[in-house]
Image (spheres, rainbow, N blue to C red):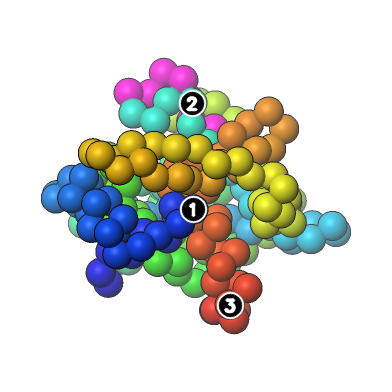
Amino acid sequence: MDFEPLWPARTSANLTATLKAHLPKQRTPAAVLVPLITRPSGLSVLLTKRAETLREHAGQISFPGGRIELADASPWHAALRETHEEIGLAPEFVEFAGYLPDHLVGTGFRVTPVVGFVQSPLRLSLARHEVQEVFEVPLDHIFDAANRRLRKRRFGDTEVEFHDIEFQNKSIWGATAGMLLTLQRLLENGGPDI
């Protein structure tokens, strides 16, 4: 799959070329789980806040996940393994729903988001050296444009606008926000049934 920047607020051929030029050439495969939970009020997504002591992405809001290892049969298996390691969610409580397009991130990872439905009640056990907390955000809140603000980031001479999603004094931004907005676009445009 060729690179397609789905997360900026606006894209063009020039912007795609600019972003491509500023991303690392070496791309480490990674996978994250986009865990969806059915609640009486509708679907919610489970997110993590990374530990403040981590060397990379400290304190950021993210999905559970990480590098795809040689022993992983697929991105789905990598996402399940990493999720179990980080938050203790056993693979048998997650049902595969589908893949979102890969996201390239500035730290050199090519991340495959894997959407899965999680059975409740949740049985979690956090790896505190990696994850500070977990929390749920209703998809209706994420998909409501009123809960977003634009943030600018510079790539070379080009300034790019990204959407941050605000929720209870937390800011969901970067690739995590991009993956959530990609999910919204796919669902609204008749994409895969998730």
Residue 93 rendering spot, x and y as whole percentages: 60, 59
Pointers 3 and 1 in contact (C-beta within 8 Å): no
The answer to whether one can see residue 105 in this image is: yes
Magenta residues? 49-55
Q: Foreground residue, 93 or 23?
A: 23
**Marks 3 and 2, the one that precedes in the sequence:** 2
Q: Residues within 10 Å of mark 3 (few under 14, many from 20)?
A: few
Image quadrant holding the C terminus, namely bottom right
Instruction: Identify the mark nearer the N-term, 1 or 2.
Output: 1
Q: In the rendered image, which quarter is residue 143 located in?
A: bottom right
Give the secondary structure at mark 1: loop
Q: Which residue is mark 2?
A: 59
Instruction: State left or right for residue 170 relative to residue 39.
Output: left
Per the rendering, the mark at residue 9 is 1
Q: Residue at x 63, y 31 (%)?
A: 170
Which mark is nearer the camera, 3 or 1?
1
Query: Could you give the CA–CA distance between mark 1 and mark 2, rounded to whole angstroms?
Result: 24 Å
| Element marked by disc 3 | loop
Q: Nearer the viewer, mark 3 or mark 2?
A: 3
Residue 54, magenta (yes or no): yes
Query: Three-letter amino acid code at disc 1?
Result: Ala
Q: Which amino acid, mark 3?
A: Asn
C-alpha separation, residue under disc 3 versus residue under disc 2: 33 Å
Are there few (<14), some (14-19), or many (20+) residues within 10 Å of tag 2? some
Question: Which residue is pictured at 44% across the width and 30% down the height?
Answer: 130
Q: Disc 1 or disc 2, which is closer to the eye?
A: 1
Judged left or right of residue 21, residue 184 is: right
Pointer 3 or 1: first along the chain: 1
